[in-house]
Image (tube, rainbow, N blue to C red):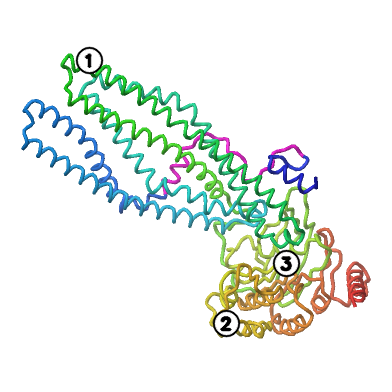
Amino acid sequence: MSNRQRQSEEKVNGKGAGSGERFVYQDDEMLEKSFDWGQFKRLAVYMKPYSKQIIPIVIVMMIVGAITKLSIPLIISTTIDSSLHVGGDAKFLFGMVALMLAVYIIQWLSNKYRIKYTSVIGQRVIYDLRHDLFRHIQRLSFEFFDKRPAGSVLVRVTNYVNSLQDLFTNGVVNMMIDCVQLVGIVIILLTINFKLGAAIIITVPLMFIVSSQLRKRVRRSWQTVNIKQSRLNAHLNECIQGIRVTQAYTQEKENIRFFEQMNEDNKQAWNRASKLNQSFGPIIEITGAIGYFILFWYGASLIQSGEITVGLLVAFASYIGNFWEPINRMVQMYSQLLVAMASAERIFEFMDEQPTVGEKENAAELPPIRGQVSFENIVFEYEKGRTALNHINVDVQPGQSIALVGHTGSGKSTIINLLCRFYDPTEGSVRIDGKDIRDVKLQSLRSQIGIVLQDTFIFSGTIRDNIRFGRLDATDEEVEAAAKAVHAHDFIVKLPFGYDTEVQERGNALSMGQRQLISFARALLADPAILILDEATASIDTETELRIQEALKTLLKGRTSFMVAHRLSTIRGADKIIVLDHGRIMETGDHDELMKHQGIYYGLIQAQYKFLQDAI
């Protein structure tokens, strides 16, 4: 068995590879706290905006529906007893039938409008909840996403929020109706005949004692289902994103086998939860049967003794049917509530996450940047004990171009991440124009920094929309001017619809070089005071790069720029080159100075020359 196969099986079976520990994503551990009504209260807050608009109408409709439903057995009882005494007077019977018909019509109308308005409330609540969750996720720091697979985040915004839909559209109101109906039935039964009513109702505590033993197991089983679904979504997202690698290494069968195992796990978890959930039904049926047995056994003796009439016995039978019906719905609702609360726990788990990079309460707007940047005694750790930068001191003057050079893992991209404040330093400070960037608003900072990454992200939409993402209020002429400046215009106009050509997800229909040219245009359209190029020309052919270099001479003029690159053509013209190794600055100077020094930089350049010569 291959190492990957063994790891796959260990992951599916709940163990880390070779560790014997349970394999879980950080956010997919079982929540051990008991059922928390506080979660329900947090959900109820989303109904508050509609409390004065729609909820009063729903409550009125709910009360009218409950009263009409409770009155029907009494009408039937009165009709039976009166008919037996008055000999079945046709006029009286017609009047009672007409009354019953009117009651049913009122009940139907009240239910119709109640369902209409509860559906409106439910959809608005789900909309607000999903909006708040997505908005909150957008604010979270890179550290949050570093530790979670994309599928695990996606499942919360889609599946988990959707699982709350029935709760808000029907569940809450139906539970209120059932509670009102139950209280009404108990009062009516005890009022009609206290002894018979008490004898029947005494079976209810028995049902709750037995069913209470199942509640914790049911809650945990639905939590397990959510965890399995979250992992399944995470793996599915990973497989889709990595399909090219999978097919390139002919690992389709392995991926299918792994997915089938996870899918089987998910199915088994769902079956176990459903089996436990369905256990409530027989408990209610048995308790209901006991109630009917008491009714007809004890009720018959009360008729013989003259304490109740036949009509009242029929009313009792009807009320008992109506009594167990809402209890059955409430038990099902409780199961639905468990599913919803398991989802709510996961949703609010994300909502309670706070950005590790946040704004101070008194954060000020960063005025237009001149471009002076300083890194003062920077120490940074991605994790405790894992030092990425060690006492970095850099001073950059406005308009200077800085090249960051070093082996993979030397800390080049980390410096860029700190400058954009994607992370905060463990020690020291980053200052722009003398201001600590932790003291200014993030939007005012990042809006003045443009960045082009090696792994360019292209959104679904048109070429024009993707370029305009750098500045949403830009005109078509400005979009095209930015494209021309980076030599993207020539290939764009050759596309079927030019700038209005729709690109697929992540721009898969475009070459890597074309995607990078679009990202160049996007960054330049934003007209940033500080421009960052993070291996931005790595996937561009030499001819295209030469044109870009000419464009950059103009575009970088007057801007402070940071370039992470290995190509000599990109590095050579920089005002200052900083050579990094294992998070430390080893050399600083321009190209000529560092070549004369014949240190680490000299070795990197010589290695690059040798590689190019060997390639030729």
Identity, as a three-letter code, of the amino acid under mark 2: Phe
Q: Earlier in the sequence, mark 3 or mark 2?
A: 3
- Spatial CA distance of label 2 from label 1 is 88 Å
Residue 497 is labelled as: 2
Tell me if 169 is positioned left or right of 152 in this view.
left
Binning the other alpha carbons within 10 Å of mark 3 as few (below 14), some (14 to 19) or many (20 upward) gives many
Residue at 82 percent of width and 78 percent of height: 569
In-front residue for pair 484/422: 484
Q: Position of residue 256 (x, y in %)?
A: 68, 51
Q: Please give the range of residues in magenta.
A: 19-45
- Contact, CB < 8 Å: mark 2 with mark 1? no
Binning the other alpha carbons within 10 Å of mark 2 as few (below 14), some (14 to 19) or many (20 upward) gives few
Tell me if 245 is positioned left or right of 237 in this view.
right
SS of the residue under disc 2? loop
Tell me if 444 is positioned left or right of 571 in this view.
left
- For label 3, the residue is 374
Residue at 70 percent of width and 71 percent of height: 532
